[in-house]
Image (cartoon, grey):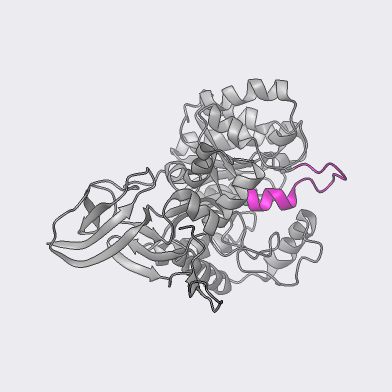
């Protein structure tokens, strides 16, 4: 007896009309016309069933703090940083936990079931670390939360930050973070990369650094990150987040840099919603886009994910945990309008970040976790176009969120009575 049978599903790899059989929280078979019986059945009706969305880059300690203690009037990075500085002393663990739990509710409703979040460790009380470790435990039944020890003010620049970072790892934070471009000098930035990579190697941890989130073409800390990744044998465990300076770099230099990143097995995370709004602010016209070179990195074999980065916080007033909105923006900013490019944008919010986080049992195949999202779309491109409704979100074989189909009722002479924005 199966626990759940999902029938007539389209899959992201192009297979159509397949059934997915689930028992004891795992997928046991994926094939056409699986005979039951099953305790319950969901007819996907030729719509897309995918593994859950994954966000490889987020800041859950700041999320939903929009308006606290005041709104970012200019909408700029600098006012955002100032605002975060004003907010930090006022943070309480309970309020932080409640905001994070609310965001996790939104995430689940949007089929986003795994998030890597950075947590600022520059506060010696480690208040946000304790709060997010609590949230991680509380949501573990329905959402995988991975924490990165993030020295927002610079691990060398901020007094005591290295010690705080070690203590955060001791408490159970999963990943070593960094922000080399925010250190006082290029040399300090490079030194921070070296020290943090050595710390990760020593402890057997992954690395995810905010790296070169600037329009300065000479901000080249990604080169140092790739170098130390190779030197320390950390291939496959290191991520460079943002990498926006690559947008402004000289092409000749990039022709040497990208093969180094690929060789080092370093993955990249672009944050299109944030990079397109925060970067290029010192430009008049033409204004740079400020997103890293996504198609070029992909062409070299570098895994590239798209992250949400921010939702309703000092830096970004918008967002709802919808990774299809992130993919939609990434597709436009990187001009990834080819068929393969649009598919890569879908992978950038599903399979690629799942690999970056090192999620086990991710995917739609026998033996994988029974974590699935039924979308009101026929294929990944339509899903991005419509930011498709998540009709059902399934975790370990159990439906944990449902949203009614998006259909507009019409009252027009000689026309159908409704539309759901799909052709034919
Ligand atoms: Fe970030």
Residue 178 or residue 384, whichever sits in front: 384
Instruction: Let me know if residue 271 appears in the view.
Output: no
Residue depicted at 64% across the width and 41% down the height: 334
Question: Can I make out residue 100 in this image?
Answer: yes
Q: Where are the magenta residues, as a range?
A: 272-288
Q: Position of residue 401 (x, y in %)?
A: 39, 69
**Residue drawn at (53%, 60%), measured in percent from left and top?**
322
Residue 285 drawn above or below residue 424: above
Q: Is residue 362 above or below residue 295?
A: below
Residue 75 figure quarter: bottom right
Compared with residue 89, is residue 205 higher up or lower down, i.e. above or below?
A: above
Where is 247 relative to 157, above or below?
above
Q: Name which residue lies at 64% across and 35% down.
A: 293
Quarter holding the C terminus is bottom left
Q: As rendered, which of 200 and 118 lies closer to the eye?
A: 118
Residue 8 part of the magenta segment = no
Residue 389 placed where, x, y %?
Answer: 47, 64
Image location (x, y in percent) of residue 286: 84, 41
Residue appearing at x 43%, y 73% in the figure: 404
Q: Is residue 287 a member of the stretch shown in magenta?
A: yes
Counting every numbered tag in the picture gives 0
Q: Going by the picture, which residue comes out furthest to the right?
A: 284
| Direction front: furthest residue | 414
Q: Is residue 107 left or right of residue 212?
A: left
Quarter of the image with the N terminus is: bottom left
Q: Name the spot of residue 291 as percent of width and height, x first.
A: 67, 42
- For residue 47, side relative to residue 389 (left or right): left
């Amino acid at each position: 007896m199966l626990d759940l049978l999902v029938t007539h599903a389209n899959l992201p790899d192009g297979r159509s009309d397949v059934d997915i059989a689930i028992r004891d929280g795992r997928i046991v078979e994926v094939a056409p016309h699986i005979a039951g019986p099953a305790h319950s059945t969901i007819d996907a009706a030729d719509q897309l069933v995918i593994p859950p969305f994954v966000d490889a880059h987020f800041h859950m300690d700041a999320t939903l703090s929009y308006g606290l203690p005041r709104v970012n009037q200019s909408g700029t990075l600098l006012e955002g940083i100032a605002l975060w500085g004003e907010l930090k002393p006022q943070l309480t663990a309970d309020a932080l936990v409640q905001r994070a739990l609310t965001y996790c509710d939104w995430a689940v409703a949007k089929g986003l079931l795994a998030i890597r979040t950075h947590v600022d460790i520059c506060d010696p009380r480690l208040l946000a670390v304790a709060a997010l470790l609590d949230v991680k435990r509380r949501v573990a039944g329905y959402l995988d939360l991975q924490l990165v020890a993030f020295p927002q003010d610079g691990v060398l620049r901020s007094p005591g930050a290295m010690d705080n970072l070690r203590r955060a790892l001791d408490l159970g934070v999963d990943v070593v973070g960094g922000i080399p471009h925010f250190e006082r000098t290029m040399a300090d930035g490079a030194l921070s990369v070296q020290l943090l990579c050595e710390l990760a190697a020593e402890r057997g941890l992954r690395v995810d650094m905010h790296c070169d989130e600037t329009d300065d073409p000479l901000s080249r800390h990604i080169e140092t990150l790739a170098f130390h990744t190779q030197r320390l044998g950390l291939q496959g465990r290191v991520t460079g987040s943002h990498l926006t300076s690559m947008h402004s770099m000289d092409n000749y230099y990039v022709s040497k840099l990208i093969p180094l990143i690929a060789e080092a097995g370093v993955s990249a995370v672009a944050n299109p919603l944030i990079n397109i709004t925060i970067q290029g602010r010192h430009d008049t016209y033409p204004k740079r886009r400020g997103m890293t070179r996504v198609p070029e990195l992909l062409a070299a074999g570098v895994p590239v994910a798209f992250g949400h980065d921010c939702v309703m916080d000092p830096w970004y007033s918008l967002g709802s945990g919808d990774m299809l909105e992130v993919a939609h923006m990434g597709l436009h900013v990187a001009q990834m309008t080819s068929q393969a490019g649009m598919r890569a944008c879908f992978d950038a919010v599903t399979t690629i970040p799942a690999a970056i986080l090192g999620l086990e049992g991710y995917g739609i195949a026998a033996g994988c976790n029974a974590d699935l999202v039924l979308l009101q779309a026929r294929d990944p491109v339509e899903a991005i176009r419509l930011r498709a409704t998540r009709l059902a979100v399934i975790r370990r074989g159990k439906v944990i969120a449902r949203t009614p189909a998006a259909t507009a009722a019409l009252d027009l002479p000689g026309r159908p009575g409704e539309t759901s924005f799909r052709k034919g």
